[in-house]
Image (tube, helix red, strand yellow):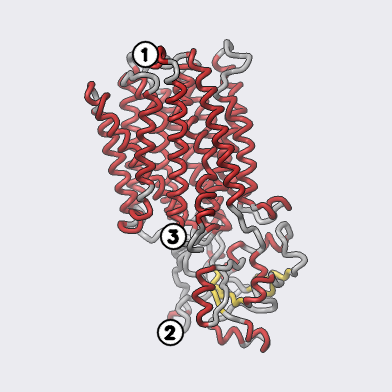
Amino acid sequence: MAGLSIRTRFGYGVGHVLNDLCSAMWFTYLLIYFHHVLLFDNSLAGVVLLIGQVADGLSTPFVGREADRTDDMLFCSRYGRRKSWHLLGTICVLSAFPFIFLGCLGCGSSDEWAQVIYYTPFVIIFQFGWAATQISHLALIPSITQDPHDRTDLVAIRYGFTVMANITVYLVTWLVLGIDATSAETGLGPEDGIKFRYIVMAVLAIGIIFVSVFHALVKEDNVPQYSRILPDTEVTCEDESNHTNHLSSSQQNSVSHCAPVHCRMTAIDWLQNMQFYQIAMLYMGTRLFCNLSQAYVPIYIQDSLQLPQDSVAYIPLVMYVSGFLTSTIMKALNKYIGRKASFILGCIIGGGACIAVWFGRGDLYKQYLLYGVAALLGAGGSIMLVTSLSFTADLIGPNVESGAFVYGAMSFTDKISNGAVVMLIQNLNPCTNCCPRCSSYYQKALAIACGAAAMLGLFAVLSLSNNIGDRQKGNVSDDCAPEHSENIGADEDTQGSTPSYTNSTMYTIACVDPSSAMAAASVGSVRSICDGFGTEKQANTTSDNNQPGSEEYAAVPQGLRARVSSSSSSSDSEDGAGVSVA
């Protein structure tokens, strides 16, 4: 719907703040915490992060599939499927994340491998909860609005709060690490473990407040909207006059509008869609750039540049302030130069920052130029991330019935690739523990890894030749092939061929009674092109059995459930048209 309220925009924006706070701690300070505070071997520090990334990566497809189910429990059907998974994920995050930065309770002097085993269940629970919260929150975007600019706006607002969450973490860290003036000028050590506990408790308290606001302000409509189609009506009207011939005189008077219904996309359909893999590659490159820069900038600052310990707070702070300022102009940037050009611009800015890191040396660089490089890293990552999420929302289009699966698949590529690259970097480290030989290693690792990620994203966006969201013939299964061309009344020699089609082009026609749309009338015979050529899908349900959880409800694709569009209603009311099926 167009014209989202401020309440919805703000409520949605703060829904991922707890995840963002924990993510900032996880990617920015996990490695340096295990390196300098717990004194773990480089490889074992990478193992802990890899376990988390693999757990997250395996959780996302599962969460995505389960969050798309329609046979919900009573609580899910009333509260909302996405919000229910969001709540479950929040509980898991709050119950497990604090233990990662509390040290090995009762086993601090044990072997490092024994401590890794201790941390593993907490890491897995945290990452499962993080994945559940992330996927459910992203999957709300296509459900909330179908307008591309509103989607970009929601993504930009979401990313704006992500940046603010990261800024909060860095401000709290800067404050806590700077309290002891005598140790602030030295590097981090085992004695700073208590400081990380204070930081974790502070950021979790802030996160609880924002996640409560999200659940209070955002309402998810989980009503079985497909019950709005007229009963006993074959919904195949090639034009409105032909369709009304099948209705009684009373029904003909009540029919107001014939609206198209889109094709349902299943997991198999997505896996046969070329753009699905192109967007996945683009998303993976973007996340690699953002997460690797976040993870290795603090180590680069400590080991390569050897700056004071509080620099691990204020240098990342510069990155995210720059990213936040950039996110505020993303809607206008996408509107005037387009998504592809915006993403290419982000790749160029990020790649330029990586070149500067490779050549950055000397006091002038440490004291002044480093801040500019950090700003470029933040701006480039911000442009790439906001645009890649908009690409993903455009790919889903109106297929909200499988939106969580798409986001889960995208996140799967992100998590697995991040874990693999971090483990590779850690294992290639020339020394076991931090030593002078590490000084140039992390400088090169940061420049090469982030630069390669930016180039991967650039290659992916350049490979996108069609409009995002096009469902070209041959890219989906024959089950979703259109029965009729949108060019109704075309020449006979063209009607016989199967046309190519897009996600925004909808072929099955549903004629809607405005009174029954608001009263949730029973469902009749719906003839859908998503069931093949010339076949009929019977959805013989009544008002008693069309509730979420019933077999009839689960059998009807979400794409066939009517959605009342305020914009369609207002425009159609001028010529007597009513609500449409989306």
Find the distance from the CA under tag 2 to the CA under tag 1. 77 Å
Closer to us: 482 or 69: 69
Residue at image point 63% right, 82% down? 254
Amino acid carrying label 1: it is: Cys
Mark in the foreground, 2 or 1: 1
Amino acid carrying label 3: it is: Pro
Residue at image point 32% right, 32% down? 448
SS label for mark 2: loop
* In the displayed structure image, the side of residue 76 where residue 113 appears, left or right: left
* In the displayed structure image, the side of residue 72 where residue 402 appears, left or right: left
Figure quadrant of residue 116: top right
Question: Which residue carries the number 1 mark?
Answer: 435
**Residue 113 visible at all:** yes
x then y, percent, for residue 24: 47, 33
Residue at image point 37% right, 60% down? 466
Question: Which residue carries the number 2 mark?
Answer: 491
Residue at image point 41% right, 32% down? 294
The answer to which of marks 2 and 1 sits earlier in the sequence is 1
